[in-house]
Image (cartoon, rainbow, N blue to C red):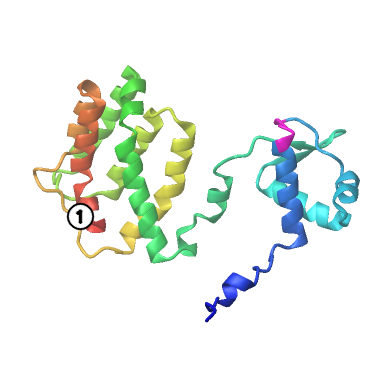
Amino acid sequence: MKNKIGLKHKIKPINTLSLVDKVELSLMEFFSENKLQPGDSIPKELEISESLGVSRTVVREALLRLRTLGLVESKKHRGMVVTQPDVLIGFEKVLDPKFHSEETLKDIFELRLTLEMGMADLLLARKTPEDLTELEQIVAREEKNNNDTTKFSLKQEVDFHGKLYQMSGNRTLQRFQNLLLPAFEYVHDHGFFDKDYIYSKKNVSHRDLFETIKTGSPEAFREAMRQHLEPHYDKVL
């Protein structure tokens, strides 16, 4: 008796890519195979159209997609050239909290916590006396304006942690933090988690974190930050 084989083993899947999709992929492969660098010119629309056997309208739409991704741009007297893409441009266009589900926003919330745990080495290696002075001033203002250090303040979190991202010296990390912040605020303001933020006396304060950055090691900072973020982790875990 012959074994029965399901349809999925007999019939090849239909290629659902549109013509524009295929041209877009072909162009990206062309850039890669020819090792084109930012500033290098690419073939004209007519050349691409004739080479691929498609209309110029299809080529134009594929190039428009690549421009949207920041992979090509139009230069006066030169035509279309390859550019260095902005890795965060897509995020900037779609990372509005109102466009995303609660599950996605919680993922973003967790991502920000992970980033702050992971930048210890950058902070300790790149801190400057000026950074430490400014960070201590932020902590002093917080202590002056808030006697209850167990109460969570979103503004104080933003001021202090925003300075940490700036101290990292990593521009992409700083921009990414700015993108994640609205989602972090949205999750907090809309009560996505059941428990309130309460810092117990055992939790590491911003003052403690500052002192660790000033005199400690990356390992010590990671542990201190983990304890500082414990109320947040309690919510997500």
Q: Residue 30 occupies which quadrant of the picture?
A: top right
Circle count: 1
The answer to whether residue 64 is visible is no
Q: Relative to residue 143, is residue 173 drawn left or right? A: right
Q: Main secondary structure of the magenta part?
A: loop
Would you place residue 150 above or below residue 127 in this image? Answer: below
Quadrant including the C terminus = bottom left
Q: Is residue 205 magenta?
A: no
Residue 92 pos. (x, y %): 54, 49
The kind of residue tagged 1 is Asp
Give the farthest residue toward the bottom: 1
Residue shown at 43% from the left, 66% from the top: 101
Would you place residue 134 above or below residue 80 in this image? Answer: above
Residue 42 pos. (x, y %): 81, 37
Give the farthest residue toward the top: 129
In the rendered structure, which segment of residues is drawn in magenta? 33-38
Would you place residue 121 above or below residue 228 in this image? Answer: above
Residue 25 pos. (x, y %): 71, 50
| Residue 229 vs residue 9, the one in the foreground | 9
